[in-house]
Image: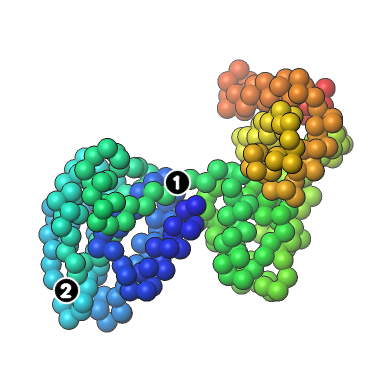
Amino acid sequence: MALDQVKRIIDEVAAGKAAPVYFLMGEETYYIDAISQYIENNVLSEEERGFNQMVLYGRDVTVEQVIGHAKRFPMMSERQVIIVKEAQDLSRTIEDFVAYVEMPQPSTVLVVCFKYKKLDARKKLSKALKAKGVLFDSKKLYDNQLPDWIKRVLAGSGYSVTPKAAQMLSDYLGNDLSKIKKELDKLQLILDKHQPITPEDVETHIGISKDFNNFELQSAIAQGDRVKAFQIVAYFANNPKHHPIVMTVALMYSFFSKLLLYHSLSDKSSAPKIMGVNPFFIKEYQVASRLYSMKQVTSILGHIRTIDMKSKGVGASQLSMVDLLHEMLLAIFR
């Protein structure tokens, strides 16, 4: 998991074993920023940084200029640090780093932040980085991985969180890890680490309703509670900024897709692992499987796909958010 890789990289840097080259690439910018910032703040002392640390931007430099800086010798220090931010602007000539990576300057720590893109694994630069430096691929987390990520990040600081609270945070904040981390930092400043973070804490300090959220909507649908489900979507329609229909529809599609998978399993004891669902929530799928047959679930998924298209303006320009949500619930409870 990326979090384990990040921890290993940071531990090595903290132990004074920084690699000569770090190439940080991929879609998830949070990890790229976390590693580069740690190196920026910790490899050199404050006194050494003035002469021996440089931050460059891909739009302002060439690969040759970066290499020129990297080949310098440090001044009154054992090392120098060169950080290239927004290096994706150098993508056309990025392979020109090959010669340097194959023979890096031992006294330089070069950090290249190549956001939103990846190197071609078949080319020389990727192979050279694996042999001589650190090549880190920062991948986006899937939605079902977010609650566990929240749990692990909090555990690293000595905090714990209830499954429902973690699910509320992930549903509400999406998969922007930087945004989630800021909210977790806020909770840690306010709350006592000796008590688990609860839905009530999330409601009070983050502003997410513990009764009107996607988690509760899923729970209501799983239990066949029509009244509660319609109350929740009415709340969503009155608060569209915090409850975008695209997110709600996507989560409902995910729920019924997993329910279809649950139906297909002959050994239900393996469901949490195969479905990628916290065991705490499996009971919902058990209950829902008795209310919605496999045939019904397949039909519901088709209706949700239609609602998704309509929510994006395809064939339903006149329908409001509440109309679309009601249409979705009517299809589910039919």
Q: Residue at x 72, y 20 (%)?
A: 299
In terms of sequence position, does the residue under pointer 2 or pointer 1 come before the other? 2
Name the residue carrying label 1. 139
**Residue 85 visible here:** no
Of the pair 317 and 285, the residue shown nearer to us: 285
Q: Position of residue 250 (x, y in %)?
A: 63, 34
**Residue 82 visible here:** yes
Q: Position of residue 223 (x, y in %)?
A: 84, 37
Position above or below: 226 against 151: above
Q: CA distance from mark 2 to mark 1?
A: 34 Å
Q: Residue at x 52, y 46 (%)?
A: 141
Q: Residue at x 37, y 74 (%)?
A: 15
Q: Say which mark, if any, is on residue 74.
A: 2
- Local secondary structure at mark 1: loop
Q: Considering the image in quadrants, where does the C terminus appear? A: top right
- Local secondary structure at mark 2: loop
Three-letter amino acid code at the position of disc 1 = Lys
